[in-house]
Image (cartoon, rainbow, N blue to C red):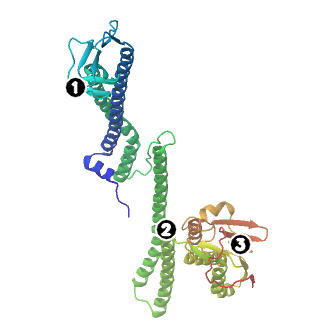
């Protein structure tokens, strides 16, 4: 189970009902503002440290010069008269107890400054205290108000600049979010127009480049192409199915009206009922074929299927029908495992055998080897130019309308083969005509199947 991160939750709390543009803009501004504030803070801290180091270095250099200027004479210690500190620097010579011996650079002594050796800040002054003898201290100080003013000015500049940059970042973030989400708006608009008006031929303008939005628009257009084709096929299928159902129903209604038009003898009624039963059986076969075709769109459930065993079982089930038609059924079957669905494979073999029984020659051979199912007969088969048409529902061969059938067999085989990533391919050769369904071969997964070796009947 996945839990949202605390940052994402806080972000949603800050912008709970805003649009995606607003959330993206806020996100851009928040991140950019944090970067700006961290950068400004870094600049301020760096500048303050640099200015303080510069001030300390000035104090140390001045202390070195003053230390070299200490002189003794007539029993006292004093600073050389030529020592003149620049600017607002002050130099003091003190006893170890803090009594000021001499001050240079200030009018009057500076009191209450630290005596501890080293650099210190005291009030508005920066102080450097150094021991220079057994009981002497040298103290150099300078006001730090200039440093404070510079830092305050820098802080104001950084604050104003940061606010301006945050405002610019918000505007730039909105522009970038709007530009990034414009293809999404077009996708939404196109989907809404399609849903409201049913204009399935409309497409989303392709976003330029090869980024995520370009891939999104290309994928949506591909999906719309697929849906449009599927809807067109379903409309065509429904139209043809309605026509195919209407014809036998009209004929059945005509028979019933004719039978009820006037009283007839029992033999006539029996003959009429027999004809109507045949028509009803044809309608049942048609509805079952339509149901099988509709089931071919169900979710895919692939499993290892032993093709040879299915072919043997289906051939044996139809052997008597072949014998009754005066046709010879030959088997050349080897063990062959494919990835498919068991009911579908049974339907494929059954449909191909029924087509061979209805339209084929006197000899029909079933071959299974290496993931290939082949049904071969001694007739020349359909016209090659008509093959693509025969793969559509309710289409039948030329001059074969007298043969019973509904034209769904090959269409169902083609759809099931495509569903399994297999290939349905016809082959015309001097010895006759054959239909092959080819799979990529998959070995058995250890399940117990019929121990089928090469079988020839």
Check the picture and name the quadrant holding the C terminus: bottom right
Check the picture and name the quadrant holding the N terminus: bottom left
Q: In whole angstroms, how far apart are the C-alphas of marks 2 and 1?
A: 87 Å
Camera-near label (1 vs 3) is 1
Q: Which residue is mark 1?
A: 123
Would residue 276 be visible to someone looking at this image? yes
User: Which of pointers 1 and 3 lies earlier in the amino acid sequence?
Assistant: 1
Whether residues under marks 2 and 3 lie with C-beta atoms below 8 angstroms apart, the answer is no
Q: Image quadrant of residue 387? A: bottom right
Q: Secondary structure at mark 2?
A: loop
Q: Which residue is mark 3?
A: 370
Picture layout, residue 455 above or below residue 398: below
Q: Is residue 141 left or right of residue 449?
A: left
Q: Residue at x 31, y 9 (%)?
A: 74
Residue 201 lies, in percent from the top left, at 45, 49
Q: Nearer the viewer, residue 158 or 331?
A: 158
User: Which of pointers 2 and 1 lies earlier in the amino acid sequence?
Assistant: 1
Residue 279 lies, in percent from the top left, at 49, 80
User: Which of pointers 2 and 3 lies earlier in the amino acid sequence?
Assistant: 2
Outermost residue on the front side: it is 75
Local crowd size for mark 2, using a 10 Å CA cut-off: few (<14), some (14–19), many (≥20): few
Mark identifier at residue 297: 2
Residue 37 lies, in percent from the top left, at 32, 34
Q: Image quadrant of residue 151? A: top left
Q: In whole angstroms, how far apart are the C-alphas of marks 1 and 3?
A: 96 Å
Camera-near label (2 vs 1) is 1
Q: In whole angstroms, how far apart are the C-alphas of marks 2 and 3?
A: 27 Å
Q: Residue at x 51, y 39 (%)?
A: 209
Q: Secondary structure at mark 1?
A: loop
Q: Is residue 424 left or right of residue 182?
A: right
């Amino acid at each position: 189970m996945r839990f949202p991160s605390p940052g994402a939750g806080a972000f949603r709390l800050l912008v709970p009902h805003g649009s995606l543009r607003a959330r993206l803009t806020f996100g851009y501004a928040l991140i950019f503002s944090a970067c700006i504030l961290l950068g400004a803070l870094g600049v301020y801290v760096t500048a303050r440290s640099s200015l303080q180091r510069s001030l300390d270095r000035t104090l140390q250099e001045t202390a070195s010069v003053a230390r070299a200027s200490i002189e003794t004479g007539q029993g006292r210690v004093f600073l050389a008269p030529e020592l003149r500190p620049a600017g607002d620097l002050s130099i003091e010579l003190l006893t170890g107890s803090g009594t000021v011996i001499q001050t240079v650079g200030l009018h009057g002594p500076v009191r209450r400054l630290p005596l501890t050796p080293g650099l210190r800040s005291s009030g508005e002054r920066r102080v450097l205290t150094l021991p220079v003898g057994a009981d002497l201290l040298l103290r150099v100080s300078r006001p730090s108000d200039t440093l404070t003013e510079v830092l305050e000015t820098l802080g104001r500049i950084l604050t104003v600049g940061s606010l301006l940059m945050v405002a610019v970042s918000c505007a730039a973030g909105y522009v970038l979010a709007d530009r990034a989400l414009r293809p999404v708006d077009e996708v939404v608009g196109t989907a809404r127009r399609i849903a409201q008006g049913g204009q399935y031929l409309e497409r989303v303008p392709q976003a330029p480049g090869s980024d995520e939005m370009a891939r999104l628009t290309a994928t949506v257009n591909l999906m719309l192409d697929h849906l449009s084709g599927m809807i067109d096929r379903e409309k065509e299928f429904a139209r043809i199915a309605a026509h195919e159902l209407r014809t036998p129903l009209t004929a059945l209604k005509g028979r019933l009206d004719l039978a009820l038009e006037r009283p007839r003898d029992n033999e006539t009624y029996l003959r009429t009922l027999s004809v109507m039963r045949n028509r009803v059986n044809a309608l049942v076969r048609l509805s079952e074929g339509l149901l099988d075709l509709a089931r071919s769109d169900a979710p895919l459930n692939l499993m290892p299927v032993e093709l040879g065993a299915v072919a043997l079982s289906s051939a044996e089930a139809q052997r008597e029908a072949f014998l009754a038609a005066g046709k010879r059924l030959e088997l050349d079957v080897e063990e062959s495992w494919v990835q498919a669905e068991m009911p579908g494979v049974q339907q494929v073999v059954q449909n191909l055998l029924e087509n061979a029984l209805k339209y084929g020659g006197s000899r029909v051979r079933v071959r299974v080897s290496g993931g290939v199912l082949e049904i071969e007969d001694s007739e020349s088969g359909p016209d090659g130019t008509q093959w693509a048409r025969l793969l559509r529902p309710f289409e039948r061969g030329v001059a074969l309308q007298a043969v019973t059938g509904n034209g769904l067999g090959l269409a169902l085989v083609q759809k099931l083969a495509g569903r399994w990533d297999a290939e349905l391919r016809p082959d015309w050769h001097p010895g006759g005509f054959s239909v092959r369904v080819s799979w990529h071969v998959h070995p058995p997964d250890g399940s117990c199947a019929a121990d089928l070796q090469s079988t020839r009947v």
